[in-house]
Image (cartoon, helix red, strand yellow):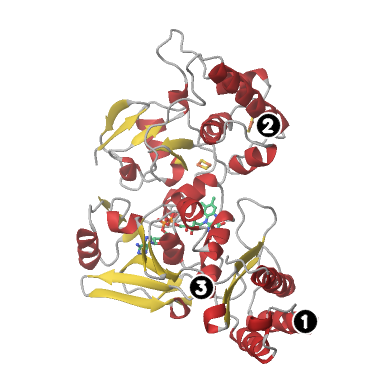
Amino acid sequence: MRVELTVNGEPLLADDVWEGESLLYLLRERLGLPGSKNACEQGECGSCTVYLDGVTVCACLVAAGQAAGRQVVTVEGLTDRMTEPAALHPIQQAFLDAGAVQCGFCTPGLLVATHDLLARLPAPTDEQVRESLAGNLCRCTGYEKILDAVRLAAGRLAADASGGHGRNAAGPKPGDQR
Amino acid sequence: MEFLAPADLGDAVAAKAAHPDAVPIMGGTDVMVELNFDRRRPELLLDLGRVPELREWDRDGDRIRLGAAVSYSRVIAELSGVLPGLAMASRTVGSPQIRNRGSIGGNLGAASPAGDAHPALLAAAAEVELTSVRGVRRVPIDDFFLGVKRHAGAPDELITAVWIGAATGPQQFSKVGTRNAMVIAVCSFGLALHPGSAQVRTGIGSAAPTPRRAAAAETFVNAALQDGNLWHSRDVLAESLLTEFARRVTAAAAPIDDVRGTADYRRRALGVLARRCLQWAWTDYRSGSVG
Ligand SMILES: Cc1cc2nc3c(=O)[nH]c(=O)nc-3n(C[C@H](O)[C@H](O)[C@H](O)COP(=O)(O)OP(=O)(O)OC[C@H]3O[C@@H](n4cnc5c(N)ncnc54)[C@H](O)[C@@H]3O)c2cc1C
Ligand code: FES
Ligand code: FES
């Protein structure tokens, strides 16, 4: 079947999509967006986390057809692609600076989950961070550096926002229905 | 495989009538795992994610009609006040991503003995609304679960909503698992106080082939509360009452040994949960709070 959807603001379409395939497969194998990772295909690891109509979901658990006509934002959509080379989002930069990336497999999902968290709670407590990132597993870092990265990102975004640079919280979120 | 995404309820039930073997998919958090691992290859996938009637909830007098596809996240955000037990159970489900997608109706459709919504729905005396081209009926939650992953819906029926009374007293839910997030319950327990009818209702999860009430425990505690005039006096519950209640809840379970825990452990843990839930709910009741 054919699936048309909007990914990172761009209308895209794919043909010959198998009816039982996941949004994750569609993104990675048909639409050339391999940022979202496939590590379990059962909702356990969060590496495939994307926004679907403004809500974070595991792309491996959404049927491709269910995303037809919807707005999807992937980790690729967090970077500012208007600049050349594309500028990293402050959350991405914070993950690099804090050493929160080792093998990097969990990172795309954590970035999207953190983006969602900081859009809702610009100054989260450690407890809130842990709770919000509970669906994202990392086998390398032991999570401490990830927590550091989230704190660093929250601080920088808050400073940006109060400095009037116009990057409000974690940036705009498309739609917000669940 | 075929993929159908009806835009309204009429088309959805017509599709289910025409294809009784079609597999409905809402949040997909159960269905997609089965597809990804090739455990299921349905002829037809019936996406109900675009049916507006399933995605809404309304209040009709003192009852809430919760559309089947309403997610755990929305129950937590929008209904914690009126459906406190279900909201508590929802908070323990999976992760934020799973709660954003997974639905109460999907939990019922899967009818797993470990489904976290079930004990809360049993305790709240919910009804499951089933719709087909033949009409709409409501099945009391007590009659809904027929066996492991089997429920009362007919092949041409869709689960369209759950009807639940707005809480009139405190409710509790508690679950044992190996950690806080992303765990299937080793065992779980839900309890609701219904002061209007002077009833305590319960729900046991993950400790029998189906979710079930602890009927003998309810009979006991209802009589004890009545005889002691406790609904009125709001006195502290006696140790002996809590102990006997927990014993009867334990006796109502029929757990198995599996990778998550032994039957003995489940019985023991369930007794602890039952006692705590009653204690917590009663403490709330004494302080006059609802939910
Ligand atoms: C990582 C992970 C963690 C999880 N953690 C928990 C947990 O902690 N607690 C818990 O209870 N569950 C948990 N689950 C299971 C699952 O998320 C829940 O059962 C959820 O409620 C399913 O809802 P859904 O909308 O995603 O259902 P779907 O996957 O869309 O459907 C579930 C079942 O119901 C059927 N169905 C769907 N809609 C209808 C309908 N309208 N009428 C009739 N049948 C229908 C489907 O055919 C399928 O058999 C978890 C799942 C994953 C992947
Ligand atoms: S690949 Fe989707 S959650 Fe692991
Ligand atoms: S950095 Fe390797 S899994 Fe997280």
- The mark found on residue A27 in the picture is none
- The mark found on residue A147 in the picture is 2
Q: Secondary structure at mark 1?
A: loop
Q: Residue at x 42, y 60 (%)?
A: B106
Q: Secondary structure at mark 3?
A: loop
* Alpha carbon separation for disc pair 1 and 2: 45 Å
Q: Nearer the viewer, mark 1 or mark 3?
A: 1
Would residue A113 be found to the left or right of residue A71 on screen? Answer: right
Do callouts 2 and 3 point to residues on the same chain? no
Does ligand 3 reach within 8 Å of label 2's beta carbon?
Answer: no
Quick check: A71 above or below B229?
Answer: above
Which residue is disc 1 drawn over? B238
Q: Nearer the viewer, mark 1 or mark 2?
A: 1
Which kind of residue does numbered mark 3 sit on?
A: Ala
Relative image position of residue B270 (x, y in whole percent): 69, 72
Please identify the quarter of the rendering in which residue A137 is found: top right
Residue B115 seen in the current view: no
Relative image position of residue B68 (x, y in whole percent): 38, 61
Which residue is disc 3 drawn over? B124
